[in-house]
Image (tube, rainbow, N blue to C red):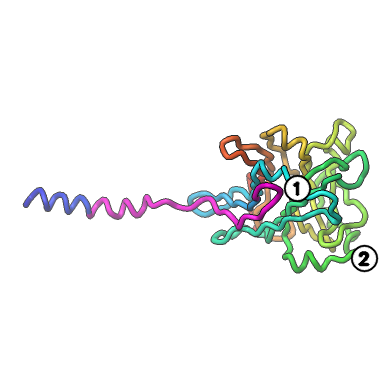
Amino acid sequence: MKKVCCLFALLLVLLPACKEDAVVQTRFTGPEVAMGNGMARAVVQTDLQGTPLSLAVEFDAAALNGLPTGHFPPPSYVLRLPAGVSLPPYDHITLDWNEHGHEPPHVYDKPHFDVHFYFMTEAERDAIGPDDSLAFNQPLPAENLPLDYLETPGGVPGMGAHVIDLRSPEISGEGTFTHTFIYGKYAGQITFLEPMITTEFLRSKPDVTAEVRQPQAWQQPGYYPTKYRVAYEAGKDSYSVVLQDFIRVN
């Protein structure tokens, strides 16, 4: 009887510990979307306390095959953020396939993906028209323009205007376009973050991490990346484009 009582007491001690050691979800995956011969999804990674660590687009290697051809405008795959986790200021992501690249010629006219991490809602983005020249060309406040970034004239309907990195090899003349990081704006507000990556670079199965130069100030609270990563994962035969090493702005 004494042994039974001791065993019961031990169980009472261990049960709360088991509850404390319960698995805490740290990877949150959004709905999958068909792209090419594969699937794409948004993924948020957090620490054990629920603090966001990264926001990524993941897609199967097969997604690079069977992509649409001859489409105008280029196909855009909308990825919803995962449920069960909050990650301001991000609302949704688009993965845009550019079969022949885009302007300017001899710079970004290679087959590539534009990965747009939008701060605005889809409805707000869809409301951006082709004749919104005033909003396209409204400059960012100086404190919101990262060092050595250039606001380009005009914009794209359903998207916004682009702010390009003057230090990137394809702009500075030191190399050709493989991957780069662009800011997006509309009506004087930063409205998206955009890594661009060529399909040729993706097929090389890279694993590179690059700096995201920061503005002096952000315009709204949230989590902002100081680095982005483009990586192939052999175990999953998949690619990821990741915003990571967040700073939190209150």
How many other residues sit within 10 Å of disc 2, few (<14), some (14-19) or many (≥20)? Answer: few
Mark 1, residue position: 67
Q: What stretch is highlighted in magenta?
A: 12-39
**Is residue 123 rendered magenta in the image?**
no
Q: Is mark 1 on a helix, strand or loop?
A: loop
Q: Residue shown at 79%/51% (left/top)?
A: 183
**Is residue 36 rendered magenta in the image?**
yes
Q: Residue shown at 85%/40% (left/top)?
A: 110
Q: Which of 232 and 149 is in front in this view?
A: 232
> Is the residue under label 2 in contact with that under label 1 (CB below 8 Å)?
no
Q: In this view, does 104 lie to the left or right of 183?
A: right
Percent of width and height locating residue 133: 93, 63
First in sequence: mark 1 vs mark 2: 1
Mark 2, residue position: 131
Q: Is mark 2 on a helix, strand or loop?
A: loop
Q: Nearer the viewer, mark 1 or mark 2?
A: 1
**CA–CA distance between discs 1 and 2?**
30 Å
Percent of width and height locating residue 187: 84, 63
Percent of width and height locating residue 170: 86, 37
